[in-house]
Image (cartoon, grey):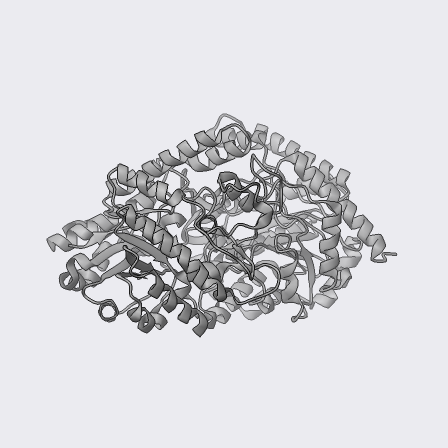
Amino acid sequence: MALTHNLGFPRVGKKRELKFAVERYWSGDLTQVELIAEGKRIRAENWALQADAGVDLLPVGDFAWYDHVLNISLLVGAIPSRHKNDESVNLDTLFRIGRGRAPSGCACAASEMTKWFNTNYHYIVPELTQTQEFSLTWTELFTQVEEAQLLGYQAKPVLVGPVTYLYLAKCVGQEFDKLALLDKLLIVYQQVLGKLAEQGVEWVQIDEPILALEIDDAYRNALRRSFDALSGQGVKVLLASYFDSIQAHVEDIQSYPVEGVHFDCVTANYDLAALETVVGQDSVLSLGVVNGRNIWRSDLEGVYQQLALVHERRGNNLWLAPSCSLLHTPVDLDQEQKLDGELKSWLAFAKQKGQELALLKNALEQRDITQLVEYSKPVKARLTSTRVNNNEVQQRVSALTAKDGQRNSEFATRIKKQAQSLNLPLLPTTTIGSFPQTQAIRKARRDYKAGTLSADAYQSQMEAEIRYAVEEQEALNLDVLVHGEAERNDMVEYFGELLEGFAFTQFGWVQSYGSRCVKPPVIWGDVSRAAPMTVNWTNYAQRLTKKPMKGMLTGPVTILFWSFVRDDLDKPSIANQIALALRDEVVDLQNAGIKVIQIDEPAFREGMPLKASQWQTYLAWAAYAFRVSASGVNDETQIHTHMCYSEFNDIIAAIADMDADVITIETSRSNMTLLDAFEDFDYPNDIGPGVYDIHTPNVPEVAWIKDLIHKAAKKIPVERLWVNPDCGLKTRAWPETRAALDNMVTATKELRSELGES
């Protein structure tokens, strides 16, 4: 009979218990012993949820205090020297790497953070030197295996594969061939597998998602060497790859000495008969037939029809799984008590996806699809629901032309008019949008939503918070101000609440990075704007100051990719629906007297297909959607956009194609190396390279900021440079925010003199 297994499970807890425990530890309100105990409790609950749902083989090692790639760095001893406090490696070592600070040890620069393939999850980038040594250092994996075994579960440890790990790492110091470190790294992986074998582990999952990329021969050869070295260590190896098709590598995979292979059958349309040839009858063929990255209920009846013959032929050697780790989905739909009943019937969270696998397994064993037919009825009903389709929205999208994605004039003409209108100094200073979300702000929002705070009282409190943020910025002498976004919960959720076609959950949290969790909206129908969303708040803030006030919006591509998006309509069409709704908002902001409008697109890079050959198609429609949202305004209105934690080299031409007047980007963690993309490409518009990292509580020194701007000025003409933090400030506290911005402004004033402002 088929076996069900899971590639990974959400680690934050049903109600974000891990987030709150970690943050209490950081603030000194929880001891390390208490934190470790809470982590153990959450892991036990996660395993119980999966086992009760019907999952046979449970993942271990998918839990992380901060990030699972960072787990591997500690496991193999790849710890940057600045993060070592003493000879011991413990939780504080991990937190210093991830956030630059821990309860013990000195503050230091956190390691760089970027997106995990094409997801909205951020991993901590490993830092490797040419003389890097590896050793088995962090033994928490073995402790967790023992925990699962003592609870009676069949544990399947999960490891990021050594080749993917090296691929994701960055070179520190001079550039070198990272694959030259593979043999030394493999020795540690062999030791890990050997210890797991001693613990009685039968299967180990080795994740090599780089197989979904178009990798070169060096990496293909490295994968062969890797699996040759990892075989024969006393455990069976399941190779897992996901996020896209790995069809191009099936001949290589066929030669790997592994006991099983997992294929993502949601993002790739495989010929299952051909896969059976790749994976011999004596090996395990794992099929990811349930979507691990979205929350829609599966059409199990349709899946059954695809698998019935495969199951008859393979029996025990057919494993059923989600397409990838369920890290990217919320924990349990049963917690949702306020969702519309019909909408709820269309959804499945992580626990429910385990139940789907169990239903499918039972149907295959019994050769009876009665339950699957009943389960799949809501899936089919959604496709024809009159609630989903809006003819007016569809007609407006169909009428879009190339002209709708163009400004009235070229940038050179626009920027002259904007300079005259805004009258800004050299190196204008600004922030990315949000200011600290204090407990008072969060309480007011909760009380308002709960009905215990009136609308008038809520508005008065939010206006007071906006007034405070404006006064602080005036005191700091920033040049372009923001209203601080006190009224906003999340940069996507806020807009989704005000747009048609979106729904919201109570507990649909997913991890973005570290302790940061987001609750993505659900795009279930055609998108439109019923009324202005930000105009009143922004206009109120503008009345408080004579300085320019930025209108703050989230862009169409980011709203698309940071939502659980409908799967019955193509993404370009959904992006254009959102873009038209935002276009209406941009025009209304301009007409209300707002001269600077920022349309954030931090997800622009992560939306790219994993295969380079498919990039241009995506970049064309994504840039067009952004231009549609921004191109309804006059030349004098300055359009900004913001991107963070992205590699820009591959997409610099597309960023230019977005035609924003000013782009602000994250560069501080990379020490301005991300600006290398601008050396070989003559980017025509203005740029604000982030001069300090807001994801750490550390306050940047004036000299540090000046040094970064001097580096930037070597690559970008100084008259086109802006000065700003690398991201929004909502997660920070006011004292550190005030100190950091004061240093930023001080550094800028000194630089204006040094760089020759008249």
Q: 635 and 48: which one is in front?
A: 48
Q: 201 and 318: which one is in front?
A: 201
Q: Specify the quadrant that holds the N terminus.
A: bottom left
Q: 604 and 400: which one is in front?
A: 604
Measured as percent of width and height from the top left, residue 381 is found at 28, 53
Measured as percent of width and height from the top left, residue 58 is found at 28, 46
Q: Is residue 554 left or right of residue 185?
A: right
Question: Residue lying furthest top in this view?
Answer: 452
Question: Residue lying furthest right in this view?
Answer: 758
Q: 25 and 311: which one is in front?
A: 25
Q: Is residue 411 above or below residue 740?
A: below
Q: Is residue 470 above or below residue 75?
A: above
Measured as percent of width and height from the top left, residue 638 is found at 69, 57
Q: Is residue 711 left or right of residue 405?
A: right
Q: Does any portion of residue 566 appear in the rendered image? A: no
Q: Is residue 254 left or right of residue 755?
A: left
Q: Specify the quadrant that holds the C terminus.
A: bottom right
Q: Does any portion of residue 436 appear in the rendered image? A: yes
Measured as percent of width and height from the top left, residue 347 is found at 32, 47
Residue at image point 58% right, 32% down: 441
Quadrant for residue 407, please give it: bottom right
Residue at image point 47% right, 61% down: 166
Residue at image point 61% right, 52% down: 669
Quadrant for residue 277, please give it: bottom left
Q: Is residue 36 above or below residue 597?
A: above
Quadrant for residue 457, please give it: top right
- Total numbered labels placed on residues in the image: 0
